[in-house]
Amino acid sequence: MSPRSVPHSGRVMMRRLVKRSSGIAATVAGIVLALTLGCGEREAAPRTAEERAARMQALIDAGNEAYSAGDYRLAARRYAAAAVLDKNDPVAYFGMGMALQKLGRDEQARAAYTRARELAKKR
């Protein structure tokens, strides 16, 4: 996704996010934002912890299905959406790393794997 294809408000958000973050966190945050911006799917935000957990699991499952079907771009978007719901879930970042690696986006995949490893150590 080129910077020009991201809506203006998305580019502004991306710049702010990168300014606040550093290193791997900035790279991963940028990946998540780029993958989730403009995916066209809008759904009401989960209101309770149970709804959030259910939505998170549904996104991970959808990412797994897309990955198994060979649709790595869709898988990466699903895992990124899961990471937006819970920025501390290593499963979402690991799945994102797998999908990005299949897409040939090795640097971004390494950043996602690194984030997954960091989060897994905290658990």
Image (tube, grey):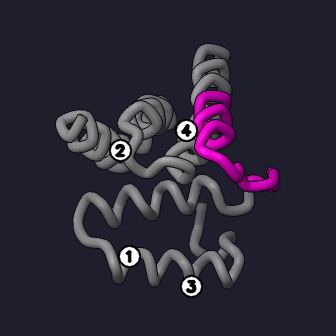
Provide the secondary structure element on which disc 2 rests: helix
- Is tag 2's residue or tag 3's residue first in the polypeptide sequence? 3
Write down the residue under mark 3.
Answer: 12
- Is tag 1's residue or tag 4's residue first in the polypeptide sequence? 1
Q: Is residue 80 left or right of residue 51?
A: left
Q: Which labelled disc corresponds to residue 79?
A: 4
- Label 3 and label 4: CA atoms lie apart by 23 Å
Residue 79 painted magenta: no
Q: Range of the magenta residues?
A: 39-58
Instruction: Say which amino acid is labelled 2.
Output: Ala
Percent position of residue 19, x then y: 35, 82
Residue at image point 37% right, 41% down: 109
Dot 1 surroundings within 10 Å: few (below 14), some, or many (20 or more)?
Answer: some
Residue 40: quadrant of the picture:
bottom right
Question: In this view of the protein, which residue sits in the foreground, 48 or 87?
Answer: 48
Percent position of residue 97, x then y: 40, 36
Write down the residue under mark 1.
Answer: 18
- Is tag 2's residue or tag 1's residue first in the polypeptide sequence? 1
Residue 43 painted magenta: yes
Up-down relation of residue 87 to residue 89 (above or below)? below
- Label 4 and label 2: CA atoms lie apart by 11 Å
Instruction: Say which amino acid is labelled 3.
Output: Val
Write down the residue under mark 2.
Answer: 112
Residue at image point 40% right, 40% down: 89
Report if residue 77 is visible in the image. Answer: no
Percent position of residue 72, x then y: 59, 31
